[in-house]
Image (cartoon, rainbow, N blue to C red):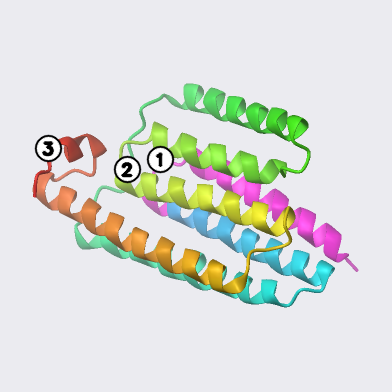
Amino acid sequence: MISLTLWSNLFTAGLLLFSLVLISKPRLPALIRHFTWASLCLAGLTVTTSLIHGDEHGIYAALGTVFFKVIAIPFILTYSARRVHASMQLKFYLKPSATYFVVAIMLATAAYVTQLFPAMPFISIALILLGLTLMIMRKDLYSQIIGFMTMENGIAAFGVLAIGGIPLLIEMGIFLTLTAGAIVMATLSRQVQEVYATGDTASLTELTE
């Protein structure tokens, strides 16, 4: 029988793996799908950590993660993109080889920070840096949203692993804020798509209404 600690390690590895893979995905459906799997791993990590520490509130936080990050937000992004017939092909500022090099630097940086501050979980620092990298390297708003959500996954992982979880009311407030932000950014992306027939964030500099 697999122990809870091993399950926790498996979910942590899955969270990092899916977050790494989504960085290189050139199509929106794959990007959203891998974010969904990463968020599901975060929910699993939250449940197993809560069971290890005997804190039942973490289970409710995991259910919130599943509802908002695995179901609601991916649905909002997919619906918004299909409604305006947005291009499923995403745009990069860097070539794939350069992208992998930047990702390797981010992981090395996360490892270095963890050495300096042992209380900081590697997975948390890595996700925050990977999310920031995704926001910088992509030209479309949907990738910006997923990058921001990946950073939030890193913050949530820090709350689970380092401080034993975030209070439920605060967690629910974060979920609602993220969902509202996703709706606003998806609406903005739709407006850019309708006005300029492109999801390129460069068009935002010309959007006046």
Q: Residue at x 66, y 27 (%)?
A: 108
Give the magenta part as a residue range.
Answer: 1-30
For label 3, the SS is: helix
Q: Which residue carries the number 1 mark?
A: 26
x and y, in percent, of residue 184 in the image = 28, 59
Q: Residue at x 12, y 43 (%)?
A: 207
Task: Check disc 3 and report the residue beneath it.
Answer: 206
Q: Secondary structure at mark 2?
A: loop
Instruction: Compute the Cα span from label 1 to label 2.
Output: 6 Å
Label 1 crowd bin: few (<14), some (14–19), many (20+), radius 10 Å? some
Q: Is residue 205 visible?
A: yes
Quadrant where the image shows the N terminus:
bottom right
Q: Please, is residue 97 above or below residue 13 in the view?
A: above
| Residue positioned 64% across, 46% down in the render | 124
Q: Secondary structure at mark 1?
A: loop
The Cα atoms of the two marked residues, 1 and 3, are separated by 25 Å
Earlier in the chain: of badge 3 and badge 2, it is 2
Judging by the rendered image, the residue that carries numbered circle 2 is 89
